[in-house]
Amino acid sequence: MLLPKKNTQATTLLLCHHGIGDVIQYIPFIYNVCKSTQNNIVITVKSNLEKQVLLSSICTLKKATIITRKDIYKLLFMRLNIREAFSIGIAHKKTKLLFKLLGVSKQYFCHPYLYDKPENFPEFDATVFNSNQQHKVEVSKELFETVYKKAFTMPDFPWLNGSSSSLKKKIVIHPGCGKTETKKRWPIRHYNDLISLIIKETNFTIIIVGGPDDLELKDQLSNTSPNVLNKIGDLSLLETTQTIQDATLVLGSDSGLLHIAAALKKNVLCLFGPTDENITAPYGDHVTILNKHVNCGPCYFSKSWDNCENNVCLKLITPKEVLKKIKEI
């Protein structure tokens, strides 16, 4: 594991302890930092899953080291010589204690959902907040420009581009959102009805994907047509990414896999309800959003989200509406 030591070349510590979607949207800026500055960069992520995403995207950048959140605390516990090794610390969440333990010289804080005043966060050298319902990518751009005092172009993920190897028309469906944010899921009965409609009215092959956290959905998707391949729990992240790369269209709710699809420049149809598509949607002109915009939404990051027992915002999106959008795309 390549890590900086005290009094060595300037190193940025980037804390990205959110999900895959946030990691994906950081990639272009990490790439630019490594290519256009003298800084090395150490990125700490939530788990090995997010680490795999970064490794598959920027593994050729020798100045980038990727470790998990557990690793950084383990290194501190082992008393390795990493204290005061970081000249810059960037966080999306308040991490005052960790920055203090590491002796980070310059500390920056960003919150993509929150509008606040810098004077409320005096412990940081600079803060960046979402002042006008900006997309998270735009907030991240502002953050990196504040830190490095240089202009960054908006991301186009050029190193993730590729071409499909198949002539068959394929729809990849990701019905899950992990175990902790199930309120972002479109109802499974709607997915079953939609799959039946797609088979009846189009010539698409359907591939259903998902990770270990989505396994409970595998048996609930009951279509037995030979044009439906249910691969939930069967594919690694790399294999899932390759499956997405080969798709004509990728469909699902607000989840990390749809951010990967958007980064791969695939046509994406994303079903939104409790989260705000202006801030968190997969990024790009090739992304289509379906959202009923109910009075109680978006409720993510609010008490309404915690108390919601009926995500009517997603239930109101009908399979026929989704099929119509699929045909238009």
Image (cartoon, helix red, strand yellow):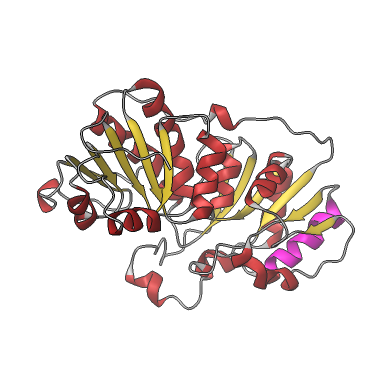
Residue furthest top as drawn: 36
Q: Is residue 155 above or below residue 190?
A: above
Residue drawn at (69%, 55%), measured in percent from left and top? 173
In this picture, residue 94 sits left or right of residue 294? left
Q: Judge whether residue 130 can be spotted in this image.
A: no
Q: Nearer the viewer, residue 13 or 120?
A: 13
In the rendered image, residue 194 lying in the magenta stretch gets the answer: yes
Q: Is residue 199 above or below residue 109?
A: below
- Image coordinates of residue 254 in percent, x first then y, are 53, 55
Residue in front for this viewpoint, 216 or 129: 216
Is the magenta region chiefly helix, strand or loop? helix
Q: Is residue 307 visible?
A: yes
Q: Position of residue 242 (x, y in %)?
A: 70, 42
Q: Is 325 on the left or on the right of 165, as rendered?
A: left
User: Is residue 12 rendered magenta in the image?
Assistant: no
Residue stretch in magenta: 190-201
Q: Position of residue 104 (x, y in %)?
A: 20, 43
> Residue 322 occupies which quadrant of the picture?
bottom right
Residue 166: percent from the left, percent from the top? 81, 36
Which of 217 and 159 lies nearest the eye of the viewer?
Answer: 159
Residue found 71% across the figure and 30% down from its top: 163
* Closer to us: 123 or 105: 105
Q: How many marks?
A: 0
Q: From what the image shows, is residue 315 above or below residue 4? A: below
- Where, quadrant-wise, is the N terminus in this rendering? top left
Image quadrant where one finds the C terminus: top right
- Residue at the extreme right: 226
